[in-house]
Amino acid sequence: MMGVGVKCLGAGALVVAGAAMLCAAAGCEPQAWRNEDGTVVTGKVDYQREPITGRTYHLYIPRTYNPRRQYPLVLTAQGTFPFDEAAGQRNRWVGVAERYGLIICSADFDSATGWLGVPNDRPAPELVRDDKAAMAIIRELKSRYNINPDGIMITGWSAGGYPAHYIGLHHPDVFRCIVGRAANFKENLVTDDVALRARHVHVYVFFGEGDLPGFDQMNRDANFWYTVRGFRNFVIRRLPGGHNPNQVEAARYFLNIVEHWPAIHIDASTTKGRAPLTVKFRALVRDPDSPDGRVDSVLWNLGDNTVSARAEVTHTYARPGLYNVFLTVVDLDGHREYTQMWIRVN
Protein backbone atom coordinates (compact mmCIF):
# COMPACT_ATOMS: atom_id res chain seq x y z
CA MET A 1 0.00 0.00 0.00
CA MET A 2 1.43 3.35 -1.01
CA GLY A 3 1.80 6.23 1.45
CA VAL A 4 -0.45 8.38 -0.76
CA GLY A 5 -3.39 6.14 0.01
CA VAL A 6 -2.70 6.30 3.73
CA LYS A 7 -2.65 10.09 3.67
CA CYS A 8 -5.90 10.19 1.73
CA LEU A 9 -7.61 8.01 4.30
CA GLY A 10 -6.06 9.85 7.23
CA ALA A 11 -6.78 13.43 6.09
CA GLY A 12 -9.69 15.65 7.01
CA ALA A 13 -12.10 14.36 9.64
CA LEU A 14 -10.31 11.07 10.39
CA VAL A 15 -8.00 11.22 13.38
CA VAL A 16 -4.46 9.98 13.05
CA ALA A 17 -5.08 6.89 15.16
CA GLY A 18 -7.84 5.92 12.75
CA ALA A 19 -5.48 6.33 9.82
CA ALA A 20 -2.96 4.06 11.51
CA MET A 21 -5.63 1.40 12.06
CA LEU A 22 -6.70 1.59 8.43
CA CYS A 23 -3.08 1.25 7.36
CA ALA A 24 -2.60 -1.82 9.56
CA ALA A 25 -5.80 -3.38 8.24
CA ALA A 26 -4.53 -2.96 4.69
CA GLY A 27 -1.24 -4.67 5.46
CA CYS A 28 0.98 -1.63 6.10
CA GLU A 29 2.64 -3.06 9.18
CA PRO A 30 5.47 -1.10 10.80
CA GLN A 31 8.91 -2.04 9.53
CA ALA A 32 11.32 -3.33 12.16
CA TRP A 33 13.82 -0.65 13.13
CA ARG A 34 16.32 -3.14 14.55
CA ASN A 35 17.78 -6.28 13.02
CA GLU A 36 17.60 -9.66 14.79
CA ASP A 37 21.12 -9.11 16.11
CA GLY A 38 20.05 -5.82 17.72
CA THR A 39 21.79 -3.50 15.25
CA VAL A 40 19.93 -0.52 13.84
CA VAL A 41 18.28 -0.84 10.43
CA THR A 42 19.63 1.85 8.12
CA GLY A 43 18.13 3.36 4.98
CA LYS A 44 14.36 3.71 4.71
CA VAL A 45 12.31 2.64 7.74
CA ASP A 46 8.60 2.82 6.92
CA TYR A 47 5.25 2.98 8.72
CA GLN A 48 6.52 3.54 12.22
CA ARG A 49 3.64 4.07 14.64
CA GLU A 50 4.12 6.06 17.83
CA PRO A 51 2.16 4.08 20.47
CA ILE A 52 0.71 6.94 22.54
CA THR A 53 -0.76 9.05 19.72
CA GLY A 54 -0.97 6.34 17.05
CA ARG A 55 0.76 8.66 14.60
CA THR A 56 2.40 7.09 11.56
CA TYR A 57 5.82 8.34 10.44
CA HIS A 58 8.63 7.42 8.05
CA LEU A 59 12.38 7.53 8.68
CA TYR A 60 15.63 7.61 6.85
CA ILE A 61 18.71 6.50 8.79
CA PRO A 62 22.03 7.13 6.98
CA ARG A 63 23.84 3.98 5.90
CA THR A 64 26.89 5.08 7.87
CA TYR A 65 24.93 5.33 11.14
CA ASN A 66 27.17 4.68 14.14
CA PRO A 67 25.48 4.53 17.58
CA ARG A 68 28.64 5.91 19.20
CA ARG A 69 28.24 9.33 17.59
CA GLN A 70 25.44 11.90 17.72
CA TYR A 71 23.36 12.70 14.65
CA PRO A 72 21.34 15.79 13.75
CA LEU A 73 17.62 15.14 13.38
CA VAL A 74 15.31 16.71 10.79
CA LEU A 75 11.58 16.57 11.46
CA THR A 76 9.95 17.48 8.15
CA ALA A 77 6.32 18.24 7.29
CA GLN A 78 4.85 17.45 3.89
CA GLY A 79 2.89 19.77 1.61
CA THR A 80 -0.78 19.54 0.72
CA PHE A 81 -2.11 16.14 -0.33
CA PRO A 82 -2.25 14.94 -3.15
CA PHE A 83 0.76 17.02 -4.21
CA ASP A 84 2.83 15.59 -1.36
CA GLU A 85 2.59 13.01 1.43
CA ALA A 86 4.71 11.80 4.31
CA ALA A 87 6.62 8.96 2.64
CA GLY A 88 7.29 11.04 -0.47
CA GLN A 89 8.48 13.94 1.68
CA ARG A 90 10.96 11.59 3.38
CA ASN A 91 12.11 10.25 0.02
CA ARG A 92 13.12 13.74 -1.14
CA TRP A 93 15.58 13.92 1.75
CA VAL A 94 17.37 10.60 1.10
CA GLY A 95 20.30 11.99 -0.91
CA VAL A 96 20.75 14.89 1.51
CA ALA A 97 20.61 12.55 4.51
CA GLU A 98 23.37 10.37 3.10
CA ARG A 99 25.47 13.32 1.99
CA TYR A 100 25.39 15.13 5.33
CA GLY A 101 24.72 12.34 7.83
CA LEU A 102 21.19 13.32 8.91
CA ILE A 103 18.37 11.34 10.48
CA ILE A 104 15.13 12.25 8.69
CA CYS A 105 11.66 11.84 10.17
CA SER A 106 8.55 12.58 8.11
CA ALA A 107 5.35 12.26 10.12
CA ASP A 108 1.85 12.24 8.68
CA PHE A 109 0.87 15.79 9.69
CA ASP A 110 -2.87 16.55 9.82
CA SER A 111 -2.33 20.31 9.60
CA ALA A 112 -0.13 20.22 6.47
CA THR A 113 -2.85 21.39 4.10
CA GLY A 114 -3.28 24.65 2.27
CA TRP A 115 -6.95 24.59 3.30
CA LEU A 116 -6.19 24.60 7.02
CA GLY A 117 -8.50 26.90 8.94
CA VAL A 118 -6.61 28.86 11.60
CA PRO A 119 -9.04 30.56 14.05
CA ASN A 120 -8.08 33.96 15.44
CA ASP A 121 -8.90 33.06 19.04
CA ARG A 122 -7.55 29.51 19.42
CA PRO A 123 -5.23 27.04 17.70
CA ALA A 124 -6.58 24.77 14.98
CA PRO A 125 -7.28 21.29 16.43
CA GLU A 126 -5.12 19.75 13.68
CA LEU A 127 -2.13 21.77 14.91
CA VAL A 128 -2.73 20.71 18.51
CA ARG A 129 -2.84 17.04 17.50
CA ASP A 130 0.30 17.40 15.39
CA ASP A 131 2.12 19.12 18.24
CA LYS A 132 1.36 16.30 20.66
CA ALA A 133 2.31 13.65 18.09
CA ALA A 134 5.57 15.38 17.12
CA MET A 135 6.78 15.53 20.72
CA ALA A 136 5.89 11.88 21.30
CA ILE A 137 7.71 10.85 18.11
CA ILE A 138 10.84 12.77 19.09
CA ARG A 139 10.86 11.08 22.49
CA GLU A 140 10.60 7.72 20.76
CA LEU A 141 13.42 8.56 18.34
CA LYS A 142 15.67 9.67 21.18
CA SER A 143 15.13 6.31 22.85
CA ARG A 144 16.23 4.47 19.68
CA TYR A 145 18.95 6.60 18.13
CA ASN A 146 21.86 8.74 19.30
CA ILE A 147 20.47 12.19 18.45
CA ASN A 148 22.31 15.45 19.02
CA PRO A 149 20.06 17.36 21.48
CA ASP A 150 21.46 20.66 20.15
CA GLY A 151 20.88 19.60 16.55
CA ILE A 152 17.13 19.17 15.94
CA MET A 153 15.40 21.09 13.16
CA ILE A 154 11.72 21.25 12.23
CA THR A 155 10.96 22.21 8.66
CA GLY A 156 8.04 22.21 6.29
CA TRP A 157 7.52 22.61 2.58
CA SER A 158 4.50 24.51 1.27
CA ALA A 159 1.54 23.83 3.62
CA GLY A 160 3.96 21.99 5.90
CA GLY A 161 4.95 25.45 7.04
CA TYR A 162 1.89 25.55 9.29
CA PRO A 163 2.97 22.69 11.61
CA ALA A 164 6.66 23.61 11.28
CA HIS A 165 6.16 27.15 12.58
CA TYR A 166 3.53 26.18 15.16
CA ILE A 167 5.35 23.22 16.69
CA GLY A 168 8.79 24.84 16.50
CA LEU A 169 7.61 27.98 18.28
CA HIS A 170 5.88 26.00 21.01
CA HIS A 171 9.04 23.99 21.79
CA PRO A 172 12.07 26.31 21.68
CA ASP A 173 13.79 24.01 24.19
CA VAL A 174 13.67 21.16 21.64
CA PHE A 175 14.28 22.74 18.23
CA ARG A 176 17.48 24.59 17.37
CA CYS A 177 15.88 26.04 14.26
CA ILE A 178 12.70 26.34 12.21
CA VAL A 179 12.93 26.38 8.40
CA GLY A 180 10.03 27.25 6.11
CA ARG A 181 10.71 26.07 2.55
CA ALA A 182 8.43 28.09 0.25
CA ALA A 183 6.05 27.57 3.15
CA ASN A 184 2.63 28.70 4.30
CA PHE A 185 2.46 31.12 7.23
CA LYS A 186 -0.26 32.98 9.11
CA GLU A 187 0.30 35.73 11.66
CA ASN A 188 -2.13 34.24 14.20
CA LEU A 189 -0.58 30.74 14.28
CA VAL A 190 0.68 31.33 17.84
CA THR A 191 0.13 33.91 20.57
CA ASP A 192 2.60 36.66 21.39
CA ASP A 193 3.36 34.93 24.70
CA VAL A 194 4.50 31.82 22.81
CA ALA A 195 6.57 34.00 20.47
CA LEU A 196 8.28 35.72 23.41
CA ARG A 197 9.48 32.41 24.80
CA ALA A 198 10.89 31.36 21.43
CA ARG A 199 12.61 34.53 20.24
CA HIS A 200 16.07 33.01 20.69
CA VAL A 201 15.41 30.23 18.12
CA HIS A 202 16.95 30.34 14.64
CA VAL A 203 14.31 30.84 11.93
CA TYR A 204 14.95 30.72 8.19
CA VAL A 205 12.29 31.17 5.51
CA PHE A 206 12.86 31.18 1.78
CA PHE A 207 10.70 31.28 -1.33
CA GLY A 208 11.27 31.23 -5.08
CA GLU A 209 11.46 34.16 -7.48
CA GLY A 210 8.85 32.36 -9.57
CA ASP A 211 6.91 30.86 -6.67
CA LEU A 212 3.21 30.10 -6.69
CA PRO A 213 0.86 33.07 -6.13
CA GLY A 214 0.71 34.18 -2.52
CA PHE A 215 3.87 32.51 -1.23
CA ASP A 216 6.05 35.58 -1.57
CA GLN A 217 3.55 37.57 0.50
CA MET A 218 3.20 34.86 3.15
CA ASN A 219 6.97 34.79 3.61
CA ARG A 220 7.12 38.59 3.78
CA ASP A 221 4.36 38.40 6.41
CA ALA A 222 6.56 35.95 8.31
CA ASN A 223 9.46 38.40 8.01
CA PHE A 224 7.37 41.20 9.54
CA TRP A 225 5.93 38.96 12.29
CA TYR A 226 9.25 37.52 13.44
CA THR A 227 11.08 40.86 13.22
CA VAL A 228 8.49 42.79 15.22
CA ARG A 229 8.54 40.13 17.94
CA GLY A 230 12.28 40.43 18.42
CA PHE A 231 13.64 37.20 16.97
CA ARG A 232 17.41 37.72 16.94
CA ASN A 233 18.37 35.04 14.42
CA PHE A 234 15.75 35.38 11.69
CA VAL A 235 16.72 35.10 8.00
CA ILE A 236 14.57 35.47 4.88
CA ARG A 237 15.78 34.87 1.31
CA ARG A 238 14.28 35.04 -2.17
CA LEU A 239 15.95 32.31 -4.20
CA PRO A 240 16.02 31.55 -7.93
CA GLY A 241 13.39 29.11 -9.15
CA GLY A 242 9.79 28.31 -8.30
CA HIS A 243 7.93 26.39 -5.60
CA ASN A 244 11.00 24.36 -4.74
CA PRO A 245 11.25 22.23 -1.55
CA ASN A 246 15.06 22.71 -1.71
CA GLN A 247 16.20 20.25 0.93
CA VAL A 248 19.86 21.08 0.25
CA GLU A 249 19.35 24.77 1.11
CA ALA A 250 17.63 23.86 4.38
CA ALA A 251 20.25 21.25 5.30
CA ARG A 252 23.17 23.61 4.68
CA TYR A 253 21.60 26.32 6.84
CA PHE A 254 20.90 23.82 9.62
CA LEU A 255 24.33 22.19 9.57
CA ASN A 256 26.11 25.54 9.53
CA ILE A 257 24.44 26.26 12.86
CA VAL A 258 25.08 22.81 14.33
CA GLU A 259 28.71 22.68 13.21
CA HIS A 260 29.84 26.28 13.68
CA TRP A 261 27.58 28.16 16.10
CA PRO A 262 27.91 27.82 19.88
CA ALA A 263 25.19 25.81 21.59
CA ILE A 264 24.37 27.59 24.84
CA HIS A 265 22.26 26.81 27.89
CA ILE A 266 21.61 28.45 31.25
CA ASP A 267 22.32 26.61 34.48
CA ALA A 268 20.40 28.25 37.34
CA SER A 269 20.54 27.25 41.01
CA THR A 270 16.77 27.77 41.23
CA THR A 271 13.98 29.13 39.05
CA LYS A 272 11.43 30.15 41.71
CA GLY A 273 11.14 31.14 45.34
CA ARG A 274 10.24 33.89 47.77
CA ALA A 275 11.74 37.37 47.75
CA PRO A 276 14.49 38.17 48.33
CA LEU A 277 15.60 35.33 46.03
CA THR A 278 19.27 34.76 45.27
CA VAL A 279 20.05 32.84 42.08
CA LYS A 280 23.41 31.71 40.75
CA PHE A 281 23.53 31.64 36.94
CA ARG A 282 26.13 29.88 34.82
CA ALA A 283 26.51 30.05 31.04
CA LEU A 284 27.04 26.60 29.53
CA VAL A 285 28.68 26.86 26.12
CA ARG A 286 29.63 24.17 23.64
CA ASP A 287 31.30 25.65 20.56
CA PRO A 288 32.34 23.15 17.84
CA ASP A 289 34.93 25.61 16.55
CA SER A 290 36.43 26.32 19.98
CA PRO A 291 37.16 23.05 21.83
CA ASP A 292 38.79 24.91 24.71
CA GLY A 293 35.55 26.81 25.37
CA ARG A 294 36.83 30.31 24.62
CA VAL A 295 34.27 32.82 23.32
CA ASP A 296 34.44 36.50 22.47
CA SER A 297 31.83 37.71 24.94
CA VAL A 298 29.03 36.75 27.31
CA LEU A 299 26.23 39.13 28.22
CA TRP A 300 23.41 38.57 30.71
CA ASN A 301 20.23 40.60 30.95
CA LEU A 302 18.78 39.42 34.24
CA GLY A 303 15.30 40.84 33.67
CA ASP A 304 15.35 43.68 36.21
CA ASN A 305 17.60 46.15 34.38
CA THR A 306 20.70 44.33 35.66
CA VAL A 307 23.36 43.22 33.16
CA SER A 308 26.58 41.27 33.56
CA ALA A 309 29.43 40.22 31.28
CA ARG A 310 30.67 37.34 33.44
CA ALA A 311 30.25 33.67 32.57
CA GLU A 312 28.91 33.09 36.10
CA VAL A 313 26.84 35.62 38.01
CA THR A 314 24.98 35.60 41.32
CA HIS A 315 22.00 37.92 41.58
CA THR A 316 19.36 38.68 44.19
CA TYR A 317 15.81 39.56 43.16
CA ALA A 318 14.42 41.85 45.84
CA ARG A 319 10.81 42.07 44.66
CA PRO A 320 8.16 39.58 43.53
CA GLY A 321 7.70 39.24 39.80
CA LEU A 322 8.38 37.13 36.70
CA TYR A 323 11.84 37.92 35.33
CA ASN A 324 13.03 37.10 31.81
CA VAL A 325 16.72 36.17 31.91
CA PHE A 326 18.27 36.56 28.46
CA LEU A 327 21.78 35.32 27.62
CA THR A 328 23.81 36.38 24.59
CA VAL A 329 27.06 34.65 23.63
CA VAL A 330 29.29 35.80 20.78
CA ASP A 331 31.87 33.26 19.60
CA LEU A 332 35.31 33.96 18.16
CA ASP A 333 33.84 33.98 14.63
CA GLY A 334 31.23 36.59 15.47
CA HIS A 335 28.22 34.26 15.65
CA ARG A 336 25.62 35.53 18.11
CA GLU A 337 23.68 32.81 19.92
CA TYR A 338 20.89 33.39 22.42
CA THR A 339 18.91 31.57 25.04
CA GLN A 340 16.54 32.58 27.81
CA MET A 341 14.67 31.41 30.90
CA TRP A 342 12.26 32.79 33.48
CA ILE A 343 12.66 33.31 37.22
CA ARG A 344 9.47 33.53 39.28
CA VAL A 345 9.76 35.41 42.59
CA ASN A 346 6.81 35.25 44.99
Image: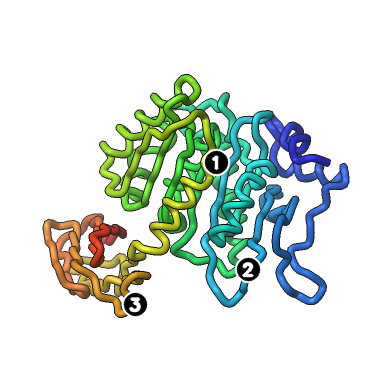
Residue receiving disc 1 = 128
Residue 346 visible in the picture? no
Residue at point 30%, 80% (across, down): 292
Residue at point 71%, 55% (across, down): 44
Please, which residue is most extreme toward the bottom here? 292
Residue 6 visible in the picture? yes
Residue 156 spot, x, y in % from top left: 52, 41
For the residues carrying marks 3 and 1, which lies nearer the camera in this image? 3
Q: Quadrant of the N terminus?
A: top right
For the residue carrying disc 2, how many other residues have a C-alpha within 10 Å: few (<14), some (14-19), or many (20+)? many
Q: Quadrant of residue 322?
A: bottom left
CA distance for labels 3 and 1: 40 Å
Q: Is residue 185 left or right of residue 128?
A: left
Q: Which mark is residue 291?
A: 3
Q: Quadrant of residue 142?
A: bottom right
CA distance for labels 3 and 2: 24 Å
Q: Secondary structure at mark 3?
A: loop
Q: Secondary structure at mark 1?
A: helix
Residue receiving disc 2 = 65
**Pick the front one: 298 or 166:** 298
For the residues carrying marks 2 and 1, which lies nearer the camera in this image? 2
Task: Give the answer, above or below, for where 203 lies relative to 330.
Answer: above
Q: Quadrant of the C terminus?
A: bottom left
